[in-house]
Amino acid sequence: MKLPIFTTLAFFGLAFVSQAQEQETDSIEDKKVEVLDEVFVSAIRVTNQTPVTFSNLTKEEIKPRNLGQDIPILMNFLPSVVTTSDAGAGVGYTGIRVRGSDVTRVNVTINGIPYNDPESQGTFWVNMPDFASSTESLQLQRGVGTSTNGAGAFGASLNLLTDGFSEEAYAQISSSFGSFKTLRNNLKFSSGILNDHVEISGRLSRITSDGYIDRASSELESYFLQGAYKNDNTLIKALLFGGHEITYQSWFGIDAATLENDRTFNPAGIYNDENGNTQFYDKEEDNYKQDHAQLLWNQRLDENWSANIALHYTRGRGYFEQFREDDDFATYGFTPVNVDGEEVNTTDLIRRRWLDNDFYGTVFSANYIKDKLNFIVGGGYNKYEGDHFGEVIWSRFGGADIGERYYDDTSVKTDFNLYTKANYSFSEQWSFFGDLQYRAVGYEANGRETGLVDDTFNFFNPKAGVTFDMNRKNNFYLSFAVANREPNRNDYENGNPEAERLNDWELGWRHITSTIQVSTNVYFMNYKNQLVLTGALNDVGAPLRENVGDSYRLGLEVDANVVLGEKFRWSPNVALSTNQNKEFIFERDGVLQNLGDTNIAFSPNVVLGNMLTYSPSTNFQISALTKYVGKQYMGNIDSEGSVLEAYSQTDLNVQYVIECDSFFKSITLSGLVNNVFNKLNVTNGYFFTYDDDFSNPGTITTIEGAGYYPQAGVNFLLGASIRF
C-alpha cells in the first residue's frame, strides 16, 4: 500500500500548495452560457454547484484515442473505472465497472433516454459500434448521482450527448488499422446550416477485427443520421442510429493451466468429429441488430422557463448460434429414435437462441431558472416487450421438425418515474440541492428459467445536499442519496431475489485555478440486500448475482488536472476503497459457516490512473497513459482460488493535425500503442463452487473453480482522418 498512500499524500500536497498561487482565476461557478444542444441532458447532468461526484469527457478529449475501440475502453482512465474486453483488445464485447459495481448497475442514457436493456439491465456497446464518433460529450456521475431515467444507479450514472448542431458544412473520412487485423472505416458529414435553421448530419462505420483471443472475431457495422431544426428558442432533433454485430463467442474464459500454456485459447465451438478429431464450429457466434429512433424537442418558453420532451423507440433482434455435442433429447422435446436397433436419446445439434424485443416511451422535463433558484421537474414512461425463443437448425439424429421452437418465452416491463430537483442559493457561498423521485416498475415473465413472474415495485428515492463556496477557488459539498433497484431477469433465473436499497453519502472538495483543478471526495455506500456478483456465470455467459444482506463500500477518490508550463499537462487520479459484505454466510462441505466480513467480488481496493501529455505545438500532442488496478477477489468468500492479481498497463497516444488551405481542411494522424511494456494482464474472470456428493457417496465436498479472460500484450492502432 506504500504507492497508493504516497500518491494520496502527493495529491493533497499539490492541492494545498496551489492555494499559494496569486494568479487571476475564473470563479468556480460555471459561466451561464446556455447551449441548446446541451438542454437534452441538462435535466440529469450536474455542475460544480451540485453536490454530486462526477467527471466529464468531451469529444476533443476522446478524439486522439478514438480509433475503433469501444466507449468503455475510452473511459478507462477516469477515476474508479475498471474495464475489460472479452476478445482481449477492446473491440467486440467490452465491460466497465465503477466503484466495483458492474455494468448492470451503471445507469446509461443517450440524450436523456435510457439505454440499459430493461430486462438484463446490461449495456451492450457492441450493438452500437463506433458510437464514440457520434458523441459530443459524456458525464460519469459516481455513486447514486441525480435522478435520471431508466434503471436505478447503484455504482454510477453515465449520460451521453450525441453530436451537436454544426453551423458549417463538412465531410470527413477516417480510417484506422492495427494489430489482430483490426480495421475501422467511417464517413461523417454535415450539411451545415441550411436556410438559417436546418442541419442534416450522419455517419457510417464498419469495424472488423480478428481479436487477440483465438477466433474472437468481430464484424461491426453502424450508422447515425440526424436532422435538426433550430431557431432562437427552439431546437428539434430527429435521430436514427443503430448497429449490426456479428462476433465469434469468447465469453467462456480459460482455466489457470491453459492461461499459463495457451493464453489465447478459446473453447467456444469445440467438438470432436466422427473420427475423434478436435474441431471448432465456425459459426459459434452472436448475430444481433439494434436500431434506435429518437425525436427530441426543446423549447425555451421565456427568459426563465424551458421544457423538452422526447419520444423514442428501440428495435432489437438477433440470436447466438451454438454447436452442442451429445445433448439430451429431453431438453428440446425430441422423441427418442432408433438407430441400428438401439434407442438414441442424445444427439449433436446446432441451435439458435433468439431475442426479439421492442422498447419505447417518452421522457420529459421542464426547467425554471431565476435569480437564486434552479428548478427542474421531469420524468418518463417506458415499456419493454421481449420474446425469448430457441430453435434447432440442425440435428445429427432427428426427433422434431427442424426450426421448431423448443422454448418460447415472453416478458413485459414497464417503468414510470417522476422527479423534481431544485438548487437554491441562500447566499453567495451557500446553496442547497434537493431531489425527489418516485419510480414504479412492473415486470411480467413466463420464462423457462424464470418461471412465472408478476412483480410490481414502488420506489421513493430522495436526495439532498449542500454546497459551500469558500472562495473563488474552493468549494465543498455534502450529499445524501437513497436508491432502490429491482432485480433483473438473470436474478429471477438464479432464485427468488429481493429488491435492493442503497444509502449513499458523498463528501467532496473542489479546488480550481487557471493551472490546477483538484477534486477530492470521500464516499460511504451502505447497501441492504445488495445483489452482488457471485463470480459465476449462467449458461449464456451472463454473470450471476445474489442478495447478501448488509454490505458497504467506503472510499476516497482524488483526481486532478495540472498545467505544467506551456507544454505539459498532467492528469492523475487515485481511488482507495474497502468493499465489504457483513457477516457473510457460506455453505462449505455441507455445513453453513459465518465467514464474518468478506470482500465484495470484483471490487479492488486500489485503482490508479494517470495521463501525462506533452504538446510542443498546438497541432501536436503525445500522451502517456497508465492504469493500475489492485488485487481483487472474483467471489465473496475470500478464497485464494478466486484472486485476480493486480495489474498495470501503460499506453502511448500520439496525434498530429495538419491544417490545409486547399481542398482538404485538415488531416489528422493518430497513433495508439496499447500495453507498451507487454504486460500479460488478466482483467476479468469468473469463480464458482459446487458440492461434490458423488465421488465419495455420503460425503459432501465443496469444489472450487475459476476462469480467466487474458488481455493482449503490446498492440497498436494507427489512423488518419481527412476533413473536407
Image (cartoon, rainbow, N blue to C red):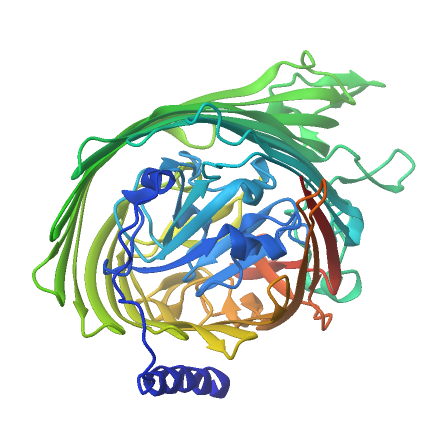
Query: Extreme top residue here?
Result: 401
Regarding residue 604, the answer to whether it shows in the image is yes
Give the residue displayed 27% in from the left and 70% down from the top: 508
Eyeballing the image, is 567 above or below 155?
below
Query: Extreme left residue here?
Result: 426
How many callouts does the rendering have?
0
Eyeballing the image, is 587 above or below 664?
below
Residue 212: give x, y in percent of width and height. 74, 53
Residue 684: give x, y in percent of width and height. 58, 59
Give the residue displayed 65% in from the left and 18% down from the top: 334
Q: Quadrant of residue 679?
A: bottom right
Residue 631: give x, y in percent of width and height. 52, 73
Q: Nearer the viewer, residue 550 or 590?
A: 550
Q: Quadrant of residue 343?
A: top right
Give the residue displayed 71% in from the left and 70% down from the top: 676
Regarding residue 697, the answer to whether it shows in the image is no
Q: Quadrant of residue 554?
A: bottom left
Eyeballing the image, is 560 above or below 286?
below
Which of the image's four quarters has the C terminus? top right
Query: Extreme front residue here?
Result: 661
Tell me if 148 is positioned left or right of 1 in this view. Answer: left
Q: Nearer the viewer, residue 194 or 552?
A: 194
Q: Nearer the viewer, residue 16 or 83?
A: 16
Tell me if 663 is positioned left or right of 510 in this view. Answer: right
Residue 546: give x, y in percent of width and height. 39, 50
Give the residue displayed 52% in from the left and 32% down from the top: 192
